[in-house]
Image (spheres, rainbow, N blue to C red):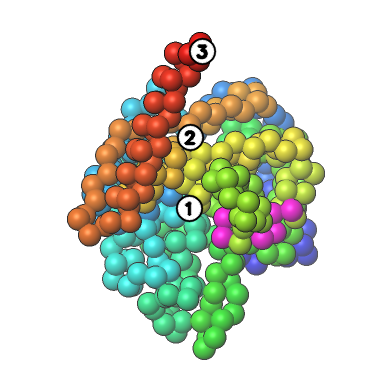
């Protein structure tokens, strides 16, 4: 997306310089300028779903698992108004063959058609075709990069915004291209200066409306602290976007209430300088290989009331279906089960009290 400050200023009167994305079956976009009422905080109450890291593949019974996830969301009461995807909708486009990637997109579309609510996509690093050291598609391929999945989903811009019942939503793109060797592109987890500039003006045009943003790679992620690894850097080059400080400064300036995140497959809620940074569980758990990351397969229900926001992380019943050759995943599941058994043993011991000598 190429929205410069000059372009923004010349188009701000049209739809608040936002690119509302009507993903099927969402209603058509409204290109008229926002009314004063739409810029004021809403008194309406509604909920929506943050659904991230589905990683759809033909393997590990993933289509069956994702269908169960969709069914769980469809059964919610009260019903959510829409679903906000969090990225990594397909298993991978970075290092799988193009035919496999094409089939993953097809499966994602077919199963997501069962969703009863409008939905809006967010780009994850694995949604991109190529852009990595293990890519299996040539940079000269006409759908190399973001084009293939965006065309398949009728998705017009990799970052955009929309309004709903007096709230402003901004969807960000953390898959940033960097030139590599022989015309290839290497993907970096960052927003980049152009998108950050667009974000500031987009949020500025939203005025006093309460605001929520979504990004795939997190602004806050505490994997090092969670694992207790003193050598794990807080600014992990894979788990946190590289321009997180610049992003957070903009969010704070515009009083954004909530940034929804994915990527780590671990539930985390962090509050900093007036903004909540909420990482939802992965719909796929640990890539449909169990829940050894620590979070069961699930999604987040977000509730908006007036200008207040609350949320809850929900799971749905699913058991991993691993192939015999998948020894690494089986080992990680066994290690997780052993830790849980040890926790139960220690709990029983400590509740029994110390023995008196």
Please tell me whether residue 219 is drawn above or below residue 130 in the rendered image: above
Mark 2 or 3, nearer chain start: 2
Q: Which mark is residue 347?
A: none
Tell me the distance, in whole angstroms, between the alpha carbons under discs 1 and 3: 58 Å
* Residue 240 magenta: yes
Asked whether residue 242 appears in the rendered view, the answer is: yes
Nearer the observer: mark 1 or 3; the answer is 3
Identify the residue under disc 3. 357
* Residue ranking furthest to the bottom: 182
Residue 300 image label: 2
Q: Residue furthest front?
A: 357
> Which quadrant of the rendered structure holds the N terminus?
bottom right
Name the residue nearer the viewer: 93 or 25.
Answer: 93
Mark 3 surroundings: few (<14), some (14-19) or many (≥20) residues within 10 A: few
Is 179 part of what is drawn in magenta? no
- Residue 120: x and y in percent read 48, 47
User: As drawn, is 208 to the left or to the right of 111?
Assistant: right
How far apart marks 2 and 3 lie (CA) works out to 50 Å
Q: Which residue lies at the image location 43% right of the left edge and 49% below the top edge? A: 53
Kindly identify which residue carries mark 1: 87
Specify start and end residues of the magenta stretch as a single range: 238-245
């Amino acid at each position: 997306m190429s929205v410069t400050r000059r372009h923004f200023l010349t188009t701000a009167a049209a739809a608040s310089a936002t690119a509302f994305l009507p993903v099927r079956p969402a209603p058509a976009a409204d290109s008229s300028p926002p009314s004063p009422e739409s810029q004021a905080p809403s008194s309406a109450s509604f909920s929506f779903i943050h659904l991230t890291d589905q990683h759809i593949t033909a393997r590990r019974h993933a289509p069956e698992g994702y269908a169960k996830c969709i069914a769980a969301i469809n059964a919610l009461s009260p019903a959510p108004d829409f679903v906000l995807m969090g990225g990594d909708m397909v298993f991978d486009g970075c290092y799988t063959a193009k035919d496999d990637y094409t089939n993953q997109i097809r499966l994602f579309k077919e199963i997501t058609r069962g969703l009863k609510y409008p939905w809006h996509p967010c780009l994850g690093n694995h949604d991109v075709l190529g852009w990595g050291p293990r890519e299996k598609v040539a940079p000269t391929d006409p759908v190399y990069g973001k084009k293939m999945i965006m065309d398949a989903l009728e998705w017009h811009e990799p970052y955009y915004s929309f309004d709903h019942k007096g709230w402003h939503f901004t969807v960000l793109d953390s898959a940033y291209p960097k030139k590599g060797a022989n015309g290839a592109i290497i993907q970096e987890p960052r927003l980049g200066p152009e998108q950050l500039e667009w974000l500031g003006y987009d949020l500025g045009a939203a005025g006093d409306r309460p605001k929520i943003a979504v990004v795939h790679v997190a602004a806050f992620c505490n994997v090092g602290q969670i694992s207790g690894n003193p050598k794990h850097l807080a600014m992990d080059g894979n788990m946190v976007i590289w321009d997180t400080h610049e992003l957070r400064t903009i969010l704070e300036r515009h009083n954004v209430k909530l940034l929804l995140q994915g990527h780590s497959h671990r539930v985390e809620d962090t509050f900093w300088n007036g903004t909540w940074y909420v990482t939802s569980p992965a719909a796929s758990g640990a890539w449909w290989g169990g829940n050894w990351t620590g979070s069961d397969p699930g999604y987040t229900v977000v509730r908006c009331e007036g200008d207040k926001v609350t949320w809850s992380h929900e799971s749905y019943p699913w058991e991993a279906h691993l192939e015999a050759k998948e020894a690494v995943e089986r080992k990680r599941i066994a290690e997780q089960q052993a830790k849980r058994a040890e926790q139960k043993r220690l709990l029983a011991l400590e509740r029994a009290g110390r023995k008196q000598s």
